[in-house]
Amino acid sequence: MSKSQPKTIYLKDYSAPDYFIEKTELEFDLFEADTLVRSKLTIARNTAKPAAPLVLNGQNVELVSVAINGEVLSASDYTVDDVSLTISNLPDTFIFECVTKIQPQDNTSLEGLYKSRTMFCTQCEAEGFRKITYYLDRPDVMSVFTTKVIADKQKFPVLLSNGNEVGAGELDGGRHWVEWNDPFKKPAYLFALVAGDLINVDSHFTTQSGREILLRIFIEPKDKNKCDYAMQALKNAMRWDEDVYGREYDLDIFMIVAVDDFNMGAMENKGLNIFNTSCVLASPETTTDAGYQRVEGVVAHEYFHNWSGNRVTCRDWFQLSLKEGFTVFRDEEFSADMGSPTVKRVEDVSMLRSMQFAEDAGPMAHPVQPSSFIEISNFYTLTVYEKGAEVVRMIRTLIGAEQFRKGSDLYFERHDGQAVTIEDFVAAMADASGRDFSLFMNWYKQAGTPKLSAKGDYNAANKTFSLTLSQSCPPTPESQTKQPFHIPVAVALLGKEGALKLSLQGDVQASISADQQEAVLELTSSSQTFVFENVDEPPVPSLLRGFSAPVKLAYNYSREELGRIITLETDGFCRWDASQQYALLVIADVMAALVNEPAPAVDESLIEAYRTVLTNDALDPAMIALMLSLPSEDYIGDQQAIVDVDTIHHARNRVVRKIALSLHAEFLACYNKIHQELSAAPYSPDATSIAKRSLKNKALAYLVETGKPEAIELCKAQFEQSDNMTDTMAALTALVHSPKAAIADLKAACLAQAYGKWKEESLAVNQWFAVQATSPVPGALAVVESLMQHEAFDIRNPNKLRAVIGGFAMRNSINFHDRSGSGYAFLADQIIKLDSQNPQVASRLLTPLTRWKKYDEKRQQLMRDALQRILDKPGLSPDVYEVVTKSMV
Ligand code: PHE
Ligand code: ZN
């Protein structure tokens, strides 16, 4: 048995499977020590591949026996290595049977069959099924599954798999069995099994055609009161998918199981979604507003996969964004419809720009449709998910909502039951709309964030405004040179009183909205000029409305022009973005001045702009809160060639403090007013209350920033009196993250009090960990090290790792990037330890070290040393190996 070296797989090498599996019959005999898996596969040769041997994937499984058409094979009839089982000279159709032995209780990778606390569960995407039994573990092999689960009845009263329950019975020795059948063909990555001592909360949904669906959420008994919100979100999602996409649910039962130990957020297994508890459980005392919104979004996301992913699935893993980009787009729109569309859009764009743009500029940059990979788990990325969603959004922008719906109907109808490609998706959109998407495909094929430069020129005599748009894209690992992208640029022209009526000169590729206030200009070459006519006054162009394309926009706005956008623009994204650009200019000034003086002045005009926003009663409070949030340190860093960690931190803090002091009275009034309004009713995670809390807590953060004793008192009072996690965490965060040395005892007391209250609530403890790990106050590393010794810390639980190690390395720049390199060394130590335990989580946590090129020479060296130390670990997983080697080039 040789150990195979990490190998690169290429999209261009795709070849259809050699065999198809028509029927899959599984039997699991679950025990605390060895679990036996009996598999019976009805296989047919792909007649296009007459001579090919049968090569089944299998990893970390012990082969007990194998038979063809009922005849047990002897060891000389097949070969086994550490990743496969090969049998030659097979007939065109046959029955393959095998028995494998596995130890789920020792499986710490949380991939395949494993144990989370007391329950058995599975995670098969992308290539986990091969850790259960030998199989053609690829998404273009789709099969009908029947699964019998056998286990001790007392310990595991609930036995689940995909589809419908078709039988159950008792066995000797206190064991019992349940059999499930899923009538829909599916790839192995959508298989699921759960065995545990669980309770269920039930509800029902009547579909548009009148079918009654049983909705059932399984949880541990202690979490009984925490699934109402997810249940309602599920029903909303089911209705929304019918209304907006015409998609109806297809089985008679839809199940969700909550598990504590999970590598990702959740998984869309057919009819049996498995969720990280953090994405399904919610209660006012343990879940923040953001947590509620995440539950709603993830429940919808997984549900939407039933069509975009399961009924129509991916041909191969290079097509991952086919299901993920489209499904993220769907869940974003759903959440927008459930709450405030503008706020949702701003939050999504803000995340994309600070996180995905960094990925696209780093060593792991890859196209939305990657052309090669070593380990597919490394490609569940912001690029595949979030940028993939932006690309789908651009398709809708280009063809309009109506044609887009026709395109999606055509896609589902044409490919139902198939495993297809991103090209198939785009072809359906092209066929439905009659538009040509050939140039547009570059969004899928090329990595990197395009830079969109714009220049405006007003001609008073002709009353024309010429807008010249140019694009370029920096090199990325897969390609040094770039073809132009097809970029939809949504534009408004703002006059002194507001948006001007638009009319374009000549025959250009563009469309103008019915109210004539917005044009979508299509940039399809490196540079184009669009001329607006009948423009009576010099306008301020408001560009990329709604963030119409995932690009970096460069336009030389003056502060005055940004001010006009902030006050007059009706597009919420542009309005918010103008406030961000304004703040960036002000912060940049402070950063430049910090070179010569320790306490430079802050441009007062920003304060006045903020004051106007803060006191504008017509604005949604959530929008006010967003507009009063300075760009994150990450986003500021992204604007620099070399990230100046310390200067960014100090300059940004200086501006924060200035705003806090100057607008103290306004913030206090705002806080008191909203606090009173909200106190009238019990906590509710509805959009209006969430918006109010977000502004109230933004005001609180600025108040605490002043360091005034009254502000600290106010914060302490909120911490003590709050009836909900949002207010509790906002107060706790403001205190814990405050640099004020005088309140050290208060911080400690509040943290102790919080832990006392949350001890038994694992999800609340995670937030308690995170608030400490992300504190910008000096000394965070020592805190993090002590948290890892805490009784509530569990190194096997990914949520805990993400809260403590992830919080420190990814959301605490100033401490992680400490000049000494202690943060880097710490992270390397953790990766080396985690690599053998859980390669997927190790590989994800490694990300911050891969960005070394963005830092100064000294830090570069320290980061590279840390990477080298990881690379030197013998037996490194392919996951970590791929990320480290690609980032050291
Ligand atoms: N397919 C899941 C989702 O996006 C994510 C996931 C991937 C979960 C791999 C587990 C493992 O909905
Ligand atoms: Zn998904």
Image: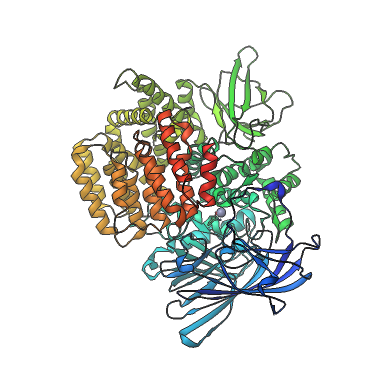
Q: Is residue 217 visible?
A: no
Foreground pick, 719 / 854: 854
Q: Is residue 325 rendered to the left or right of residue 140? A: left
Q: Residue at x 69, y 40 (%)?
A: 441
Foreground pick, 825 / 449: 825
Q: Residue at x 27, y 56 (%)?
A: 755
Q: Residue at x 38, y 36 (%)?
A: 817
Ligand 2 is found in which quarter of the picture? Answer: bottom right
Q: Position of residue 358 (x, y in %)?
A: 50, 37
Q: Position of residue 503 (x, y in %)?
A: 66, 26
Q: Is residue 107 visible?
A: yes
Q: Position of residue 199 (x, y in %)?
A: 43, 72
Residue lying farthest bottom? 172
Q: Quadrant of the C terminus?
A: top right
Q: Residue at x 48, y 68 (%)?
A: 104
Q: Is residue 565 rendered to the left or right of residue 283? A: right
Quarter of the image holding residue 415?
Answer: bottom right
Q: Position of residue 726 (x, y in %)?
A: 34, 50
Quarter of the image holding residue 19?
Answer: bottom right
**Above/below status of 711 relative to 658:** below
Q: Quadrant of the N terminus?
A: bottom right
